[in-house]
Amino acid sequence: MATRLAAAAGALVLAVACRGNHRSAAAGHVAAPDTAARSDTVNLYAAAGANRLSPRAAQARPLVYVPNSKDGTVTVIDARTYRVLRTFPTGALPQHVVPSYDLTTLWVANNLGGTLTPIDPTTGQEGASVPVDDPYNLYFTPDGRFAIVVAERRRRLDFRDAHTMALVQSLPVQCKGVDHMEFTADGRFAVATCEFSGQLVKVDLEARAVVGYLTLDPGGLDSTAMPQDIRSSPDGRVFYVADMKANGVFLVDPEAFRRVGFIPTGRGTHGIYPSRDGRLLYITNRG
């Protein structure tokens, strides 16, 4: 996990379409038919497009919040001028800054501090931290009912009330190093990466139960899998899984829960970030 503190050393852009063969890459792009303009095509990223932000999101100040894991602080940067405005203390080892389901709060996950620090996005001001066990990462279920705290060291997914953060249920997982998560387009399942066992775990959100594990065997890549970030294609048919040791992105069918391809990107593949229109995925390679 200490390697997460390093800065991304490079990036590769994948062109993503809603249908077609996602298995090969050429000149840094995935070849796929252009179907983004079809009116019957689902685009999970549509709400992030230009002039598509919700009124609540539009009220947020244009600020960037950078968690400083070693210092136990968050630095606030003006997104327009790139000027550092201030740095404030949180708890030990802040890992991620995550918006709440209703977009009224940004939560700083203080992993070793055992707290979540709220930030008001309309003012940029932090509030009193909330005690939460082992919050490496944080997600909200598609129906908005639960916050899922990814308790990596505890090997748990903790379902909490999305507003009060009161614990509802702890779900143990058998894989090691549970980290990042993505949801299926129908909102029924979550798939999380487990970096230290080279696996994915699939969770039924209604039952709040594990339904399966998928081992990402790199095969002839002469490497042991170490999955990190995970993102859906715009139509939800393919999940892209960044792998630090395989140096590329695994493609997974989330419904069948099986590997369907691999795209080499660069050394230390870690983060996957969609463009606002969902047509591109930016892959960070740490080197």
Image (tube, rainbow, N blue to C red):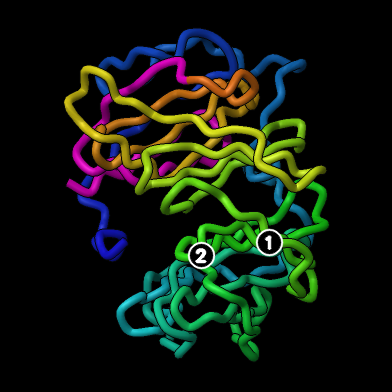
Q: Where is residue 127 drawn, in percent x and y?
A: 64, 88
Q: Is residue 179 above or below residue 233?
A: below
Q: Residue at x 60, y 86 (%)?
A: 126
Q: Where is residue 262 drawn, in percent x and y?
A: 35, 21
Asked if residue 78 lies in the magenta stretch, the reply is no
Residue corresponding to mark 2 = 154
Asked if residue 279 lies in the magenta stretch, the reply is yes
Q: Which residues are magenta?
A: 259-287
Q: Quadrant of residue 201?
A: top right
Q: Amino acid at mark 1?
A: Ser
Q: Where is residue 243 drawn, in percent x and y?
A: 33, 38
Residue corresponding to mark 1 = 170
Q: Is residue 261 above or below residue 3?
A: above
Circle 1 crowding by C-alpha within 10 Å: few under 14, some 14–19, many from 20: some
Residue 211 versus residue 96: which sits nearer the camera?
A: 211
Residue 33 versus residue 140: which sits nearer the camera?
A: 140
